[in-house]
Image: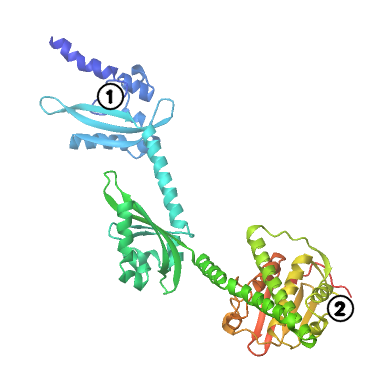
Amino acid sequence: MSDVTGTAPARLIDQVVDYAIIALDGSGTIESWNAGAQRLKGYTPEEALGRSFAMFYTPEDRRAGLPLRLLDEARVHGRTQSVGWRVRKDGSRFWADVTITALHDDDGQLVGFGKVTRDLTEAHRLEEELRRSEERFRLLVSQVVDYAIIALDASGTIESWNAGAEWHKGYTAEEAIGRSFAMFYTEEDRRAGLPLELLDLARREGSVEHSGWRVRKDGTRFWGEVVITALHDDHGELTGFAKVTRDLTERKRLEEAQASFLGTIAHDFRTPIAAMKGFTELVRDAPDDKRDDFLGRIDANADRLMQMMSDLVGYATHHSISTTLRPEPLDLAKLARDTVATMGSASELARIDLPDAPVMVLVDRAAMERVVTNLVGNAMKYSASDPIAVDVHSTEQSVRLTVSDQGRGIPEEDLDTIFDEFQRGGLATDDGGTGLGLSSVRRLAEEHGGRVSIHSVVGQGTIVSVELPARVRSVA
């Protein structure tokens, strides 16, 4: 019976295939070899028995003395564990989890070592892929500049800080990490408890979205679109929050400008229409010497409506489809003369000085007609009966169209925004119009590869210049 039970463990070990289980003598020489060892390492028992177990280690590990060091650790501590690359008979490598246990006789004398090896190559590959994926994600998050992406602990303290957060909010990572995220909120929002309210909502709902004014390090404000997401561990416990912020200041300003525009457009349209209806009633009963004056006023208001409609159509076209320019060689001076000739009566146009000398340029005719119409129309509107000058001249690099008037001018504080959509300037608030004419001029100039500039002094007049690339030589 004792013989049978004594050989059963040996037979069990010999037939195990998922683990390489081998016995070493006190110097590390292989004394036994099971099926798992042959399967994992590729050697038959005849090829392995009697050789040093160091043959399974990489050349670099052998040079570093790792095999004998592991035996010494097992001898001193009773056992040791090591994870690393090992080498098969065919030279291929596998990631091994190795346990070496010191074996003693009944008198406590060391008689050898038991060595158990498990192949964890696939698990190691998955771990490495996960590590690389996490590293790539960390690098991605840290280097994104369009979004501020930060991690908060459960109380709202900042734990991580990416490049987008620094770009949007102005703080470096050293200045932000460890502080409460509430520092980005306006004083009134902090007093109202908004930061903690958002964390509570994210905790209850999983995530929360919010848009509002936020504060940069320098005190300036930006319109932030914020998403806060609650983060949990494997047991469902809250570990913190992820907070993503996008700067939508320009969109917010445009929305506000559009809202203001829509709020005034009804008034701007009603005014000329009401005037036309009133003058129409007067014409019916007016004496002959008054009738022409009333008809002229009706005509002027109709022109005003047509210009407003033209601006609106141009705006809608620009924002719904891309503009397709069809450049052709044109005499810009002649185009200016022809365009201005359609903008009013002979008496109205008599005060406009137009260019004579031909200046050739490669442009889209319809686009340049719109530019001239907008600039000259503004000059006529805001300069009463004062002279207006339209000039075209060229250099080797550019062709410049300039429209000058001696009208009321534009306040200096409005000059930086006067070419923006829906901007009409402080002095023009009550004049009607859409605030789209000059923005259209800038857009059309830029689509031609050019630019527009303005100089204006209140009470002295305005000069607007459109500079275009000189792609066609001037003609003498």
Report how many numbered discs are placed on residues in the image.
2
How far apart are the alpha carbons under marks 2 and 1? 100 Å
Residue density around tag 1, few if under 14, some if 14–19, many if 20 or more, within 10 Å: many
The foreground one among 211 and 380 is 380
The foreground one among 55 and 211 is 211
Please, what secondary structure does the residue beneath circle 2 have?
Answer: loop
Q: Which residue is at a point 71% across and 71% down the rendered structure image? A: 306
Rendered view: 247 above or below 334: above
Residue 434 in view here: no
Residue 169 horizontal/vertical position (percent): 43, 67
Name the amino acid type tagged 2: Ala
Name the amino acid type tagged 1: Ile
Quarter the C terminus occupies? bottom right
* Residue ranking furthest to the right: 476
Rendered view: 290 above or below 437: below
Rendered view: 13 above or below 441: above
Q: Which residue is at a point 42% across and 52% down the rendered structure image? A: 138
Residue 396 horizontal/vertical position (percent): 79, 73
Q: Which disc number belongs to residue 357? A: 2
- The residue that mark 1 highlights is 21
Q: Are marks 2 and 1 in contact (CB under 8 Å)?
A: no
Please indicate whether residue 22 sits to the left or right of residue 439 in the image.
left
The part of the image, by quadrant, that contains residue 381 is bottom right
Please, what secondary structure does the residue beneath circle 1 have?
Answer: strand
